[in-house]
């Protein structure tokens, strides 16, 4: 069963790599896939990211739900599409050095730096001795210190047939975004590191 699933995933990946508009074409060929969902059985009010996890109530029929369009950007590698670099406005120090090499603290004084955590770096260096052992991922992220300054990001909104932009120019971001989710790298942290709840 697993082997059949892998074959199907490989075919899907091939389609996605060749055609950036694959979603729209699939929906045109199969309109029912755009679909309607039953109401969630969990308490959607308990989560701030409810629309991402459970979808949203249909504006046409209060008994039906639909999944919202998600505009996602990530710094993790490998990155097929949705690179985090595409939404950075300012505040980043460009550094072309190998991320597996230790960084000098002075580098972070001029801006945020794309880097990897200590444990991630040590793990990658270890497996490189054995050809990588098949691990192709790398948890890269933007790191900064107080003197790195302000990081400015652009909030992406991708158009689709189900999410057209309205003509009025004075609409708030809430018109297009139900929620914005920021993620931090999952590594051991001390009391001196940035706290996203209080420092963002």
Image (cartoon, grey):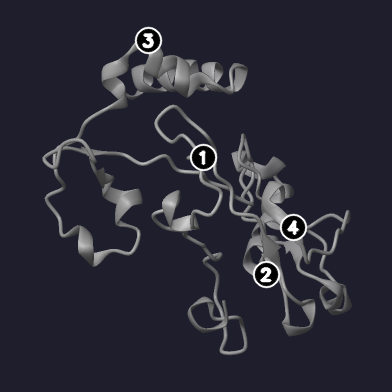
Tag 2 secondary structure? helix
- CB of mark 1 within 8 Å of CB of mark 4? no
In this rendering, would 16 be left or right of 68?
A: right
Closer to the camera: disc 1 or disc 3? 1
First in sequence: mark 2 vs mark 1: 2
Residue 21 percent location from the top left of the image: 54, 21
Label 4 packing within 10 angstroms: few (<14), some (14-19), many (20+): few
Q: Is residue 62 above or below residue 100?
A: above
Q: Secondary structure at mark 4?
A: strand
Q: CA distance from mark 2 to mark 1?
A: 48 Å
Q: Is residue 1 visible?
A: no
Label drawn at residue 167? 1
What separation in Å lies between label 3 and label 4 (alpha carbons)?
A: 37 Å
Q: Which residue is mark 3?
A: 29
Categorize mark 3 by other alpha carbons within 10 Å: few (<14), some (14-19), many (20+).
Answer: few
Q: Secondary structure at mark 1?
A: loop
Q: Quadrant of residue 189?
A: bottom right
Q: In the rendered image, which residue does mark 4 sit on? A: 89
Report, in whole angstroms, how far the alpha carbon at label 1 lies from the one at label 3: 29 Å
Residue at 76% x, 77% y is 149
Mark 4 vs mark 2: in front: 4
- Mark 2: few, some, or many residues within 10 Å (few <14, many ≥20)? few
First-in-chain label (3 vs 4): 3
Q: Residue at x 54, y 66 (%)?
A: 184
Foreground label between 1 and 4: 1
Q: Position of residue 172 (x, y in %)?
A: 49, 58
Q: Are marks 3 and 4 in contact (CB under 8 Å)?
A: no
Whole-angstrom CA distance, mark 1 to mark 4, is 25 Å
The residue labelled by disc 2 is 118
């Amino acid at each position: 069963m697993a082997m059949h699933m892998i074959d199907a995933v490989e075919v899907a990946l091939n389609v996605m790599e060749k055609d950036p508009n694959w979603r729209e074409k699939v929906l045109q060929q199969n309109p029912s896939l755009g679909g309607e969902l039953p109401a969630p059985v969990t308490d959607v009010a308990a989560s701030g990211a409810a629309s991402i996890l459970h979808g949203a109530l249909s504006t046409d029929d209060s008994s039906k739900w639909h999944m919202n369009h998600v505009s996602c950007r990530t710094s993790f590698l490998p990155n097929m599409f949705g690179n985090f670099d595409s939404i950075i406005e300012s505040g980043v120090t460009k550094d072309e050095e190998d991320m597996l090499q230790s960084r000098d603290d002075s580098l972070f004084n001029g801006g945020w730096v794309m880097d990897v955590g200590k444990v991630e770096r040590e793990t990658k260096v270890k497996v490189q001795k054995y050809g990588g052992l098949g691990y192709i991922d790398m948890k890269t992220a933007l790191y900064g210190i107080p003197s790195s300054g302000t990081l400015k990001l652009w909030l992406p909104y991708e158009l689709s047939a189900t999410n057209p932009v309205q003509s009025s120019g004075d609409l708030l971001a809430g018109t297009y975004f139900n929620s914005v989710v920021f993620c931090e790298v999952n590594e051991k942290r001390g009391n001196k590191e940035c706290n996203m709840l209080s420092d963002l």
